[in-house]
Amino acid sequence: MPTRRALLAAGAAAIAVGSASAFTRDRRVLHVRPGDSVQAAVDAVPGRGWTIVVHPGTYRETVNVPADKEELTLRGASRDPRAAVVVFDNANGTQRPDGSGTYGTAGSATFTSAAAGLRVRDLTLANDWLRADHPDITGTQAVAAYLTGDRTHVENVRLLGHQDTLFADTTALASFDRQFFRGCHIEGDVDFVFGRATAVYAHCHFRTLQRDVAFTPKGMVFAPSTARANPHGFLAVRCRFTSGAEDGAYKLARPWVPSYETTAWPSLVVRDSLVGPGIDPVAPYTNMRDAYPWQSMRFAEYRNSGPGSVITVPGNRPQLTDAEAASHTPATYLGDWSPQHTGSL
């Protein structure tokens, strides 16, 4: 089976056009082409409301959008998200070049943003660090995107990794920053969608990977760490869950109560979604630590379908009533922010 690294290189090479040149400026738009640096374009943005267009190619670098680059749009020049790929391979346990220690989970991210009003669409953000290549490293979290900042909108984006692919977080413990993902492909194995953001995933595809281990579960899709004071955590609506692993090898979620925020009360609702056979239908939830059992968390489902959603042990699959489901919609989670098209969900 080809590795993700090979597939990323082949896909970008097949679609790439143009030649290397310094990024070009067109009114409030910066263009990045093969041979350019996406980070250099971010650094060149003088204020809020700019757009960076990433032309087809592979950009092997880390990108950091600071908080002062508000209302930035980063988009692929093609509507095919496979065409423009931003990828790197740091992990939690990777040593920093300056000898100051390891990157840590958040620091491993290929793409990081703390900017309010960020919009990302039509490209791929990936972390292709592989456990098999680094048997000496035990900190195997390798983040593709670490997103904080209110009103982050991600659409038609591929988010690729293994452990901890998407870190959907907030700028501070007391902030209830909102994120909206639409039509995205998100894949990984262990806790690959995690964090404390108020995050809506609409019409997204969650793909669990085959993992060369002898035990099950091989991993979990979600690991929310919602603040106790936040009424809304993760909401997946009209999504689908597929797998490259055997039936029942994955859990839908486990709660993450970080050591730095032991009052967290993780929240996840999966509704109106197609759950494939890769998810264990008998016991779709598990604990990260026994001190914080999943049964004490805010986990629920509503009107899901597919073999991975079959209710065999009702106590293992909390279900919302119709009345409760009315308060778990994109509109209620996002409040006075209305990203494009959310009204039809």
Image (tube, rainbow, N blue to C red):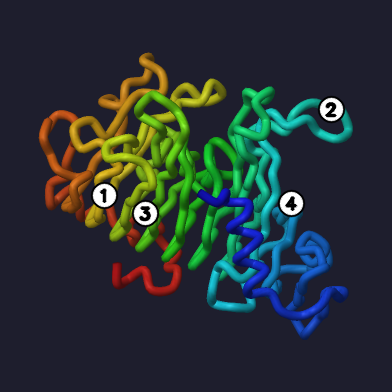
Q: Are marks 4 and 1 in contact (CB under 8 Å)?
A: no
Q: Earlier in the sequence, mark 4 or mark 2?
A: 4
Q: What's the distance in space between the residues labelled 1 and 3, CA to CA? A: 26 Å
Mark carried by residue 308: none
Q: Quadrant of residue 70?
A: bottom right
Q: Are marks 1 and 3 in contact (CB under 8 Å)?
A: no
Say which amino acid is labelled 2. Ser
Identify the residue shown where x is 31% and y is 56%: 240
Q: Residues within 10 Å of mark 1 (few under 14, many from 20)?
A: many
Say which amino acid is labelled 1. Gly
> How far across and how far down the image is residue 333, in percent?
37, 54
| Circle 4 residue | 62
Q: Is residue 311 left or right of residue 76?
A: left
Q: What's the distance in space between the residues labelled 3 and 2, CA to CA? A: 40 Å
| Front: mark 4 or 1 | 1
| Circle 1 residue | 276
Near-viewer residue (67 or 131)? 131
| Circle 3 residue | 333
